[in-house]
């Protein structure tokens, strides 16, 4: 038996190494992709302006994957080195805890087999996460906190407006520290219990999306089967979130849910990663009229970079979508909402965000518009609506 174990141990080590360094990266490489389109040469004018900006993004799923975000990768969309290259100052990192097999933008069943369970087992998440959506969200938060503990000069988890002010001040002094705001993509990790809002809040979550690709206990998804508004549990959860100064995200919510939330609370909402239906008429996008209602209530809309949201993911068309959004909603209500590392194909990664600045200049955006959309709107929104301290 001892001899058998001596032989088995190096074999197991080889298999584990192959799994970690070959198989898992291969999975992500097939899901978080680039279009392959060449980017323009960075002009000196765009470089100087981009380096002076506050750049912020409302949605990335980077901690879903097994990559070490402290290291530069040649796949995926976000890591800390590329964030520094792109002058990224603020990033909302969202926890994806359930995703239906065969997900699509038209209709998904709530009881469809779950993709994230397979990913959790394959990536060796703790067994407690294998059958609990709450534990998956807590595990994701733990990963972000662990990274911030390992490299505190590079990333800090933001729990309050005071935290964010400190990071912004440190960046003014040249620190390059990234402000990480934790969010959940769909509130199904509540698992039907209001008390779990408190557990997620204590873990650092300050943004809560109500739905993802399927209807849940809170109400209907834009891609579910019911089209329903908020349930009684959903109404109670939304009130509790508002009472805790948690920012509510309706990026995947049914139009009925969006209207119900607007009527229920007087805090502004975000639509963290989306397109505009008037520019890209797909089931991924809610109506322009409802977007205007979100903006009229003080909300913020993050423009995505992938085809399902903007139809054409080229920088030129993304910026045209931004112009449409500014004209429709007002410049103060438009932000970036990449959906980086969210199983999407994009034309540029976090290290190449300058391409948006350059394209805005080319299309005649004013410096004021560029500064607001690239990150000042997001910064000011969170300073106003996060817990004060």
Image (cartoon, rainbow, N blue to C red):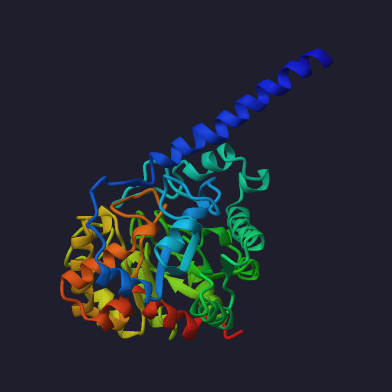
Q: Is residue 205 left or right of residue 62?
A: right
Seen from the viewer's position, the closer of residues 112 and 51 is 51
Name the residue: 56% across, 65% down: 154
In the image as oriented, which residue stretches furthest toward the right? 2
Above or below 140: residue 241: below
Give x and y (percent) for residue 102.
37, 41
Camera-side residue: 19 or 253? Answer: 19
Total numbered badges shown on the rendered structure: 0
- Rendering coords of residue 283 (x, y %): 25, 57
Q: Quadrant of the C terminus?
A: bottom right
> Which residue is situated farthest in the front direction here?
44
Residue at figure coordinates x 56%, y 31% from the top left: 19
Whether residue 93 is visible to the viewer of this picture, yes or no, is: yes
Q: Give residue 365's position: percent from left, percent from top.
A: 20, 77
Report which quarter residue 282 is drawn in.
bottom left
Does residue 159 lie above or below 187 as drawn? below
Q: Quadrant of residue 30?
A: top left
**Residue 163 falls left or right of residue 352:** right
Horizontal side, residue 234 vs residue 2: left or right: left
User: What residue is at 77 percent from the left and 14 percent from the top?
Assistant: 4
Which quadrant would the N terminus be assigned to in this image?
Answer: top right
What residue is rendered at 61% in x and 25% in y? 15
Q: Which residue is nearer to you in this view: 337 or 211?
A: 337
Return the x and y of residue 343 as percentages of the image width and height: 38, 48
Is residue 97 in view?
A: no
């Amino acid at each position: 038996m001892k001899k058998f174990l001596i032989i088995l141990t190096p074999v197991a080590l080889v298999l584990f190494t192959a799994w970690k360094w070959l198989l898992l990266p291969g999975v992500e490489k097939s899901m978080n992709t680039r279009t392959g389109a060449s980017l323009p040469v960075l002009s000196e004018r765009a470089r100087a302006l981009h380096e002076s900006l506050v750049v912020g993004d409302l949605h990335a799923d980077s901690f879903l994957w097994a990559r070490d975000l402290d290291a530069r990768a040649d796949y995926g969309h976000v890591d800390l080195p590329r964030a520094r290259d792109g002058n990224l100052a603020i990033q909302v990192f969202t926890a994806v805890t359930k995703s239906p097999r065969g997900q699509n933008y038209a209709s998904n069943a709530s009881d469809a087999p779950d993709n994230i369970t397979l990913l959790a087992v394959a990536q060796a998440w703790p067994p407690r996460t294998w059958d609990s959506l709450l534990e998956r969200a807590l595990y994701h938060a733990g990963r972000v906190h662990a990274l911030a503990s390992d490299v505190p000069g590079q990333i800090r988890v933001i729990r309050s407006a005071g935290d964010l002010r400190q990071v912004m001040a440190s960046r003014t002094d040249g620190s390059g520290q990234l402000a990480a705001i934790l969010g959940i993509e769909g509130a199904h990790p509540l698992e039907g219990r209001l008390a779990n809002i408190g557990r997620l809040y204590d873990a650092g979550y300050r943004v809560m999306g109500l739905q993802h690709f399927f209807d849940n206990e809170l109400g209907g998804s834009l891609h579910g089967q019911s089209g329903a508004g908020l349930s009684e549990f959903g109404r109670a959860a939304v009130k509790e979130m508002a009472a805790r100064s948690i920012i509510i995200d309706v990026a995947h919510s049914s139009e009925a849910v969006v209207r119900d939330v607007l009527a229920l609370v007087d805090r502004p909402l975000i639509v963290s990663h989306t397109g505009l239906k008037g520019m890209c008429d797909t089931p991924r996008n809610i109506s322009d009229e409802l977007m205007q209602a979100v903006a009229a209530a003080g909300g913020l809309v993050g423009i995505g970079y992938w085809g399902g949201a903007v139809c054409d993911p080229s920088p030129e068309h993304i910026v045209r979508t931004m112009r449409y959004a500014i004209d429709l909603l007002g410049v103060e209500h438009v932000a970036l909402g990449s959906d980086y590392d969210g199983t999407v194909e994009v034309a540029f990664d976090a290290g190449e965000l300058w391409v948006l600045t350059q394209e805005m200049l080319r299309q005649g955006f004013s410096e004021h518009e560029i500064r607001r959309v690239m990150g000042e709107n997001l910064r000011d929104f969170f300073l106003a609506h996060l817990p004060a301290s």
